Amino acid sequence: MPPAGRADATAGAAARGSLGAALAGLTTRGRSFLAAGVAAAGCSYVLGQEDLLRVGLLLTLLPLVCVIVLHRTRHRVTGSRRLEPARVPATAEARVSLRVDNVSRLTTGLLMLQDRVPYALGPRPRFVLDRVEPGGRREVSYRVRSGLRGCYPLGPLELRLTDPFGMCELTRAFSAQDTLTVVPRVDALPPVRLGGTAAGHGDGRHRSLALAGEDDVIPRGYRHGDDLRRVHWRSTARHGELMVRREEQPQRAHCTVLLDTRGTAYPGAGPGAPFEWAVSGAASAAVHLLERGFAVRLLTDTGSSLPGPDGAGGSAHGPAETAGLVLDALALIDHSEGTGLSPALDALHTSGEGLLVAFLGELDEQQTAVVARMRQRSGTAVAFVMDAASWAGPAARGTAAGRGGGERLRMLRAAGWTALPVAPGAALPDLWRLAASPDGRAAGARDGTAGGRS
């Protein structure tokens, strides 16, 4: 513990430093008054004029009193921010409300509010507020919008106070910050059947227990209220206590949404880039399937599941909470440094039979073969593949790369995928409906194969 003298010296230094910072806030008018007062006091001493000394003291004390009063008032003005909503889709607006409370016994001078916002959200909002009476409050609001996904910090809020005479200006910064999460745009998809249906129907169906015969019965202990007609006497004799048949318990249909994030697979950048279309498509598909009762796992080309190591289809969260976690994860997702889809193929070992929806970038022959093998580890597979030639422009459509894109789609359809090309301006709801239609599933009919099974 420091000596008392040292503590007092430290406190005095802090007070002097704070007062010095307040004096630095003198405006040009305040400095002029202070200089004029000092000059008048000096002239009164030289000329022996007491009236001139009184004028000098008045001119000197007025800015100093304003500094002291404003310095005390600065710490009695509080500011707060309210963000509604905290999560918005890209290009949507969020409203930010600012509130200032005067908890002092003095009326404030003019106040200027300035909130710090990132450049992507627009210019910094500034507001000039009239004097706030003791115990009064003022509220203002502004709107922000971003076309790019991400998490954007808002704040800190800066408050500039001015005394009624305009002698001094002091700034107070509040440490509180809020975060605006801009998630990918989610399109409403039509309620069509791609090959799996929730609640234990379709290709995604998995019955955990069956009652086909005596050898298939998995009994459990008797519980109060169980129907005695469900008592399994053979198991009761074996365990020495009453055992009953378990009821058939259908599990949720499973779906894996695969998002290709390879930087080499997508040309361009910005809101209209193909990668942003793929991210928005993955978000729309995941939210749509969650609403239909699927257990959804979001998988990337690196083999990692989002938003956590166990994926988004766990039972710890409800559909709405899981959808929020998925959108938050997709808000921050970026290109990966990987060049292949083999890690995602290995991760599909644990997914089992179920629906697979993939959003893929440009594919070469090797990666097309990897994607084709993914079909063997899923029940129904639907792929939305970026048409590299269309995104590159009309000049690339007749090139070898443009012709290769069509060949890649035929290879996927031959492997059992329902593969659809994605061109600039394509609407996912239309492609989603086409993937479920007979024409979409039989897109590879010219190759003599079905585009998928349902």
Image: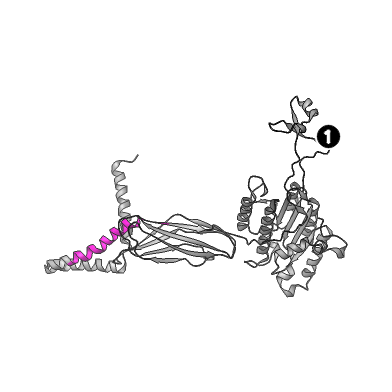
Residue on which the image places disc 1: 215
Tell me residue 276's x, y (percent): 65, 63
Stretch in magenta: 55-79
Residue lying farthest to the left in this orientation: 48
Tell me if residue 204 can be seen.
no
Is residue 369 depicted above or below 295 in this figure? Answer: below
Tell me if residue 23 can be seen.
yes
Depth check: 13 or 293 in front?
A: 293
Q: Which amino acid type is shown beneath numbered disc 1?
A: Asp
Which of the 4 image quarters holds residue 129? bottom left
Tell me residue 88's x, y (percent): 57, 60
Q: Residue at the location (78% across, 72% down)?
A: 399
Q: Residue at the location (72% across, 30% down)?
A: 221
Whether residue 73 appears in magenta in the rendering, the answer is yes
Q: Identify the element where label 1 is drawn.
A: helix
Classify residue 297 as left or right of residue 368: left
**Magenta region, mostly helix, strand or loop?**
helix
Depth check: 144 or 402 in front?
A: 144
Tell me residue 167's x, y (percent): 29, 66
Q: Quadrant of the N terminus?
A: top left
Whether residue 443 appears in magenta in the rendering, the answer is no
Way the structure is coloured: one colour
| Tally of marks | 1
Q: Residue at the location (48% across, 65% down)?
A: 142
